[in-house]
Amino acid sequence: MSDTIKTDVLIIGAGPIGLFAVFELGLLDIKVHLVDILDKVGGQCAELYPEKPIYDIPAIPLITGHGLTDALMQQIKPFNPTFHLGEMVTTLEKIGDSQFRVSTDCGKVFEAKAVAIAAGGGSFQPKRPPIPGIEPYEDKSVHYAVRKMDAFRDKRLLIVGGGDSALDWTLNLQPIARRLTLVHRRDEFRGAPDSVNKMRALVASDSMDLRIGQVTLLEGSNGQLTAASIKGNDGTITRLEVDALLPFFGLTMKLGPVADWGLALEDELIPVDTSTFETAIPGLFAIGDINTYPGKLKLILSGFHEAALMAQKAYHYVYPEKRLVFQYTTSSTSLQKKLGVA
Amino acid sequence: MPKITFIEHDGTVHTVEGEIGSTVMETALRNDVGGIVAECGGACTCATCVVHVDDAWSAIVGPPSAEEEDMLDFAFEVKPTSRLSCQIKVTQALDGLIVRTPAYQGR
């Protein structure tokens, strides 16, 4: 295990609210690390609507999810936060007054004086296809992500999906697989045209197989797949001998480990005090879509407000001996210095 | 107002009034119809509001757009009559529409 990473505040979730919290905390000289399960910042803005318009950010008549993420990254740049992407926070425990220990599924351990949960709708996790009896094979011979390509060397692989993940892994794994079959529900692919062309060339040269249909049945034992049945759109069933199945149907939000952190959740949401956005556990905050309180609206603008008030309270955990004087960025030279503009 | 009938996978039937200009997805959520998740809130980006349009209504509802067809790649057990309900606008012409909601939307 690596050395413990010490920080003032740890933010769980690098969506728009987690990012803006870096700004509000940064103005108060509070150092931040952020953890996000996605391999990129922006949360839902990056994963669900990078190109979709958002019309209700105050003073910004129109911006895309991607644009908002980029703008927030520019805004928080002076504070130089540290990102830990592609990692899921698994455990969180209070180990003393103003002291939390948090660990991730990649083995990192953090110690923070305060923690802000900005996890939105929970953690993005792969959609599991509704193939009967798939569970015992998961993580043994059914994989929703490729961690080590070599694990698939000389295997008979079945990849399912029509997007970039399915195509990219088809192209990456085809050279080392014993035989690779791609299954998709239609003979059109939403993935990058270049990847589609490369895949079609491999099919044309009989270097891999493409089947149109859906996987309906798995066979195997003790978690090891031996065969899968594919139902074509004309109803015919084809049985294929396979060693591994890789379904790529995108991501969905699941609450995840937050449920295990000793918070009394209401409808999978974290109740907070609206003057501080602190949970029932002192020093543990919840901001953005993951929290609930009377009148809550799941709006980005509400989350921004929540981040600002959270930072005011978090200051007292980080600097218990200091008195906080509220200042405006427009007039405060000291804030402008922090922003690198004075 | 047009009436829309939702049939859940377990056979539960809801016949509800749809508001013209809103979507079939919004109509389902407003009336507590099971089987619609609508994670992205109607942006056509999550494929968790799939419905199977009744055969008799499929031609009237029409086919999905190219963008919606792409998103259906992330849904399960897609049929030729499957649509994302957030992309079906309620109109008077849909009075009497029947759609079925699936058992599973991916979560």
Image (spheres, coloured by chain):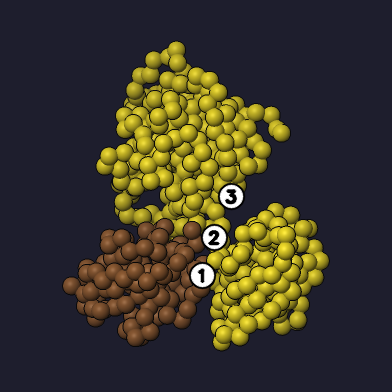
Q: Is residue A130 left or right of residue A121?
A: right
Give the residue at mark 2: A127
Circle 3: element type: loop
Give the residue at mark 3: A39
**Percent position of residue A252, x then y:** 50, 57
- Amino acid carrying mark 1 in the image: Phe
**Percent position of residue B85, x then y:** 36, 69
Q: Determine whether label 2 and label 1 are within 8 Å by CB.
A: yes
Seen at 41% across and 75% down, the residue is B52
Quarter residue A1 falls in: top right
Seen at 61% across and 64% down, the residue is A133
Q: Residue furthest left?
A: B1
Q: Determine whether label 3 and label 1 are within 8 Å by CB.
A: no
The chain identifier of the residue carrying mark 3 reads: A
Give the residue at mark 1: B76
In front: A67, or A20?
A: A20
Q: Which mark is residue B99?
A: none
**Percent position of residue A173, x then y:** 73, 65
Quarter residue A333 falls in: top left
Give the letter of the yellow chain: A
Give the letter of the brown chain: B
Location of residue A225 with respect to A124 vertically, above or below: below
Q: Determine whether label 3 and label 2 are within 8 Å by CB.
A: no
* Badges 2 and 1, same chain: no
> Alpha-carbon distance for marks 2 and 1?
10 Å
Quarter residue B27 falls in: bottom left
In front: A270, or A327?
A: A270
**Percent position of residue B81, x then y:** 42, 80
User: Looking at the image, can residue A341 be seen?
Assistant: no
> Alpha-carbon distance for marks 3 and 1?
25 Å
Q: Is residue A40 left or right of residue A50?
A: right
User: Looking at the image, can residue A245 be seen?
Assistant: yes
